[in-house]
Each structure stands twice: as C-alpha cells, then as structure tokens.
Image: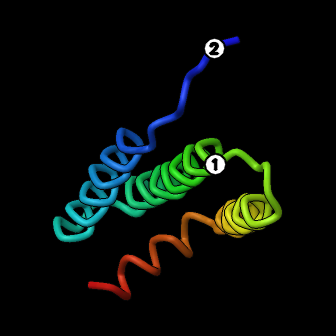
Amino acid sequence: MASFIPNHRKKLDRLKRVESNLRRLLVRGASEEKLLEAAAEVRDCRIRVLRAKQNKNPERTPEERAAFLKIEDKIAALKTLTPETVLAGFIRKQ
C-alpha cells in the first residue's frame, strides 16, 4: 500500500494563478467567452483544493468525520455554481 499524503500547496498555488488570470482578464476587458471559461477554471480549481484537503484528513474519529462531511458540503455547493455566478462574485469584489 502506498503511503502517499496529498499536499494541497500545489493546488493552492494553481488556484492563485487562475484567480489572478481571471482578474487580469476582467481588467483588460476580455470577451465574455474567455471570462466564463476562466471562471469555470476557477471553480474547478477550488474544488480540487477542497478535495486535496479532504483527502489529507483521515476520518477515524467523529470530529474528523464531521470535518470531512463539511468539506464535502462545500464541494457540493461549488459544483452547483455556474461560471456566471463565479464571475459575478469576482466583479463584485473589484
């Protein structure tokens, strides 16, 4: 059995790059198609970060199980977001 422990730092770094790319596209006034594509990538990166954090925590105790399920709820909420809502959140922050 492999003893691999997932590290979410790489995924966090990728998320920062993708978010900054979306901000850059907003400032430059890119086409809506490119903005929606970048927003979908942001959503997917956020899900990957949460999955890595979830896999890092074993669920041996009830507290760990609760943390696991809390992250699962966040992932489910992110999956329901459309690229338009992610983009609207970025525009609101600016």
Quadrant location of the N terminus in the rendered image: top right
The earlier-in-sequence mark between 2 and 1 is 2
Can residue 76 be seen here? The reply is no
Q: CA distance from mark 2 to mark 1?
A: 16 Å
Camera-side residue of 57 and 49? 57
* Residue at the spot 30% in from the left edge and 46% down from the top edge: 13
The crowding category of the residue bearing disc 2, from other C-alpha atoms within 10 Å (few below 14, some 14 to 19, many at least 20), is: few
Q: Specify whether 25 is left or right of 38.
A: left
Camera-side residue of 18 and 82? 18
* Residue at the spot 72% in from the left edge and 68% down from the top edge: 70
Q: What amino acid is labelled 1 in the image? A: Asn
Camera-side residue of 11 and 20? 11
Q: In the rendered image, which residue does mark 2 sit on? A: 2
User: Residue 71, percent across and down?
Assistant: 67, 62
Quadrant location of the C terminus in the rendered image: bottom left
Q: Specify whether 81 is left or right of 83.
A: right
Badge 1 element? loop
Label number found at residue 40: none
Q: Specify whether 68 is left or right of 27.
A: right
Q: Residue furthest bottom?
A: 92
Q: Specify whether 23 is left or right of 79.
A: left
Label number found at residue 57: 1
Circles 2, 1 touching at the beta carbon (< 8 Å): no
* Image quarter of residue 82: bottom right
Q: What amino acid is labelled 2 in the image? A: Ala
User: Residue 34, percent across and down?
Assistant: 38, 53
Badge 2 element? loop
The crowding category of the residue bearing disc 1, from other C-alpha atoms within 10 Å (few below 14, some 14 to 19, many at least 20), is: some
* Residue at the spot 30% in from the left edge and 55% down from the top edge: 16
User: Residue 67, percent across and down?
Assistant: 70, 65
